Image: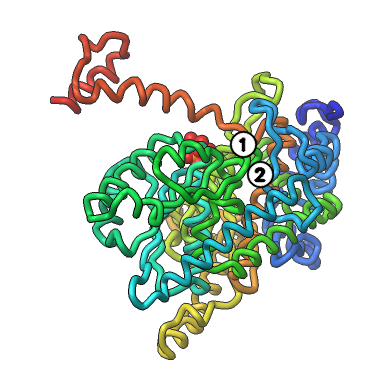
């Protein structure tokens, strides 16, 4: 890979600094719209399945020009091409990053034959599970996914989003937490003979997943199942086929180490999605992501929506100093999207050193958080409107409700009329954040000029969801490439795991005067034991 300068050593970074001082810091959105009647058209963009309005952001044409220069100077396009070609851009783990290969057309990406064969096996199995739901004598009624992090958040988010497309006879459940209350709650609602467990773990070593899988197996055996039945009621999605076999699992869907956990819903980890929406639905999800991949791979920076979003993230984080971004999906099916994005963005770009290990003098990942609209409006929007921090908000609006979500004519009518309220609320919040409201009474005064981005989907379908997720993946990639970090490792989660392992035996006893522990940890341990 050619050497590119660190972002803060580029000409564009210096230009952006000057531009921020001269125009960016004090840019008033209301004045910007008054000055430029074409502002909306100028700063709105099309990408596969999506429309994006950036016009309510604190930027102008020069900002986008400098940001595009920044992307080029930092080699974002070269790093993108290297990723797509299968080069080992995950330097600290010595791995390629090829989740895009999982949705590429045949022959168009590395490992094509292997990917195709693995997907066909997984989709055939998903169809067989769906068929078992219709078995009159011994119907399958429940699928329980046991996994955590990327082996939970993506599939769980997508299954919730695509509920109107799902096989209605199958209950889809997700267990992730090592807290036994999580699995206890699910097991109290299902019966062994009617349940399929999917043990989803890239490594098949993750403590939470192994503990929950062992509990599920013990419950299954205690409920009358035999060891032979385990093979029919437990399957695995993992890169560690041997460990799954040792657990007693006969059916394993594999994938490779070049699929990062938080990028894995397109792989065998997507099995619950495929079970819910079927092979055709899963293929549509992949097709939506593929369309976004093609846009990301070919559109010039100035029109490349994932790149633009990632660059605006850099603009806000490093020049405006905004420390967080709130995501407000105005579709209840996207209720798990903020949690999914927290891992995608913060595990990818929450890094304090560059690819070579040098400490960074500038900020990286913002805090990403949110709730579906309109719920968030009645919780934290107060702070967005009148708090002391400026927090850019990302609205996701979906034009049409899905009539399939309605179980009767009355509910379908309500879906349509409540959809109008939903959209009006989303639009109104973005408008209020920007406009503000002058009042002589300070408590009623809204300063306004608060930035927001609005993404619009026509409908929430497997295809549009695929495009939306891929948009976020490539946006995170873009910001990470500008910051010069390895967006694909996650060493920061290891220390807590190691210390957790050391503390585990001390929870029940055996602590010699708190030896080796800081006073706080030792004190808390005593408190928990007494
Ligand atoms: O601890 C972080 C992490 O490694 C994530 O990156 C990953 O998605 C999650 O744990 C689960 O890992 P696995 O799929 O190997 O169980």
Disc 1 under 8 Å from ligand 1? The reply is no
Which residue corresponds to the image point at 64% horizontal and 57% vertical from the top-left?
453
Position in image of residue 340 (x %, y %)? 52, 50
Residue receiving disc 1: 349
Q: Is residue 373 left or right of residue 90?
A: left
Regarding mark 2 in the picture, which secondary structure is present there? Answer: helix
Q: Is residue 230 left or right of residue 80?
A: left
Q: Counting other residues with Cα less than 10 Å from the Cα at mark 2, is it few (<14), some (14-19), or many (20 or more)? A: many
Q: Counting other residues with Cα less than 10 Å from the Cα at mark 1, is it few (<14), some (14-19), or many (20 or more)? A: many
Q: Is residue 253 left or right of residue 172?
A: right
Give the CA distance from mark 2 to mark 1.
Answer: 7 Å
Outermost residue to the bottom? 409
Residue receiving disc 2: 476
Disc 2 under 8 Å from ligand 1? The reply is no
Which residue corresponds to the image point at 61% horizontal and 53% vertical from the top-left?
266
Position in image of residue 184 (x %, y %)? 26, 51
Tell me, for residue 424, which label it has, or none.
none
Looking at the figure, which quarter contains the C terminus?
Answer: top left
| Labels 2 and 1 touching (C-beta < 8 A) | yes
Regarding mark 1 in the picture, which secondary structure is present there? Answer: helix
In the rendered view, tell whether residue 85 sits above or below residue 48. above
- Res. 452 image quadrant: bottom right
Position in image of residue 231 (x %, y %)? 40, 52
Q: Is residue 498 visible?
A: yes
> In the image shown, does 310 or 14 lie closer to the viewer?
310
Outermost residue to the left? 530
Which residue corresponds to the image point at 55% horizontal and 27% vertical from the top-left?
491
């Amino acid at each position: 890979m050619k050497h590119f300068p660190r972002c803060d050593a580029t000409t564009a970074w210096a230009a952006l600094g000057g531009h921020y001082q001269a125009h960016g810091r004090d840019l008033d959105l209301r004045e910007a719209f008054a000055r430029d009647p074409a502002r909306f058209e100028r700063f709105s963009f099309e990408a596969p399945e999506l429309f994006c309005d950036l016009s309510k952001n604190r930027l102008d044409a020069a900002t986008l020009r400098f940001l595009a220069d920044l992307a080029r100077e930092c080699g974002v396009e070269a790093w993108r091409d290297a990723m797509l070609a299968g080069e080992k851009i995950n330097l600290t783990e010595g791995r390629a990053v090829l989740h895009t290969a999982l949705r590429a057309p045949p022959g168009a990406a590395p490992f094509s034959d292997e990917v195709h064969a693995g997907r066909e096996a997984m989709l055939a199995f998903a169809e067989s599970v769906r068929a078992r739901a219709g078995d009159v004598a011994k119907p399958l009624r429940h699928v329980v996914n046991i996994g955590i992090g990327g082996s939970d958040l993506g599939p769980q988010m997508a299954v919730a989003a695509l509920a109107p497309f799902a096989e209605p006879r199958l209950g889809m459940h997700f267990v992730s937490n090592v807290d036994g209350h999580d699995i206890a709650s699910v097991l109290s609602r299902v019966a062994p003979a009617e349940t399929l467990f999917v043990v989803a773990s890239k490594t098949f070593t993750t403590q939470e997943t192994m503990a929950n899988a062992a509990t599920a197996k013990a419950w299954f055996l205690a409920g009358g199942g035999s060891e032979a039945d385990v093979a029919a009621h437990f399957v695995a999605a993992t890169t560690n086929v041997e460990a799954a076999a040792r657990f007693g699992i006969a059916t394993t869907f594999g994938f490779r180490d070049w699929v990062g956990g938080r990028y894995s819903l397109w792989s065998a980890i997507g099995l619950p999605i495929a079970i819910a929406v079927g092979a055709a639905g899963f293929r549509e999800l992949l097709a939506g992501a593929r369309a976004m991949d093609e846009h990301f791979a070919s559109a010039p920076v100035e029109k490349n929506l994932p790149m633009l979003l990632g660059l605006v993230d850099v603009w806000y984080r490093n020049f405006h100093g905004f420390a967080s971004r709130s995501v407000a999906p105005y579709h209840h099916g996207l209720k798990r999207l903020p949690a999914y994005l927290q891992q995608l963005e913060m595990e990818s770009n929450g890094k304090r050193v560059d690819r070579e290990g040098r400490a960074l003098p500038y900020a990286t990942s913002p805090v990403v958080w949110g709730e579906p609209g309109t719920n968030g409006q009645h919780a934290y929007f107060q702070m967005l409107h009148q708090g002391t921090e400026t927090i850019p908000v990302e609205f996701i609006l979906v034009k049409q409700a899905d009539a399939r979500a309605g179980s009767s004519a009355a509910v379908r009518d309500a879906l349509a009329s409540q959809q109008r309220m939903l959209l009006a609320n989303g639009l109104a919040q973005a408008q209020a954040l920007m406009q503000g409201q002058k009042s002589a009474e300070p408590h009623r005064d809204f300063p306004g000029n608060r930035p927001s981005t609005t993404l619009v989907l026509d409908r929430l379908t497997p295809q549009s969801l695929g495009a939306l997720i891929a948009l976020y993946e490539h946006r995170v990639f873009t910001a990470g490439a500008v910051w010069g970090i390895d967006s694909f490792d996650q060493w920061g989660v290891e220390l807590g795991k190691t210390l957790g392992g050391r503390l585990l035996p001390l929870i029940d006893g055996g602590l010699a005067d708190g030896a080796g522990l800081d006073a706080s940890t030792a004190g808390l341990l005593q408190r928990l034991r007494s």
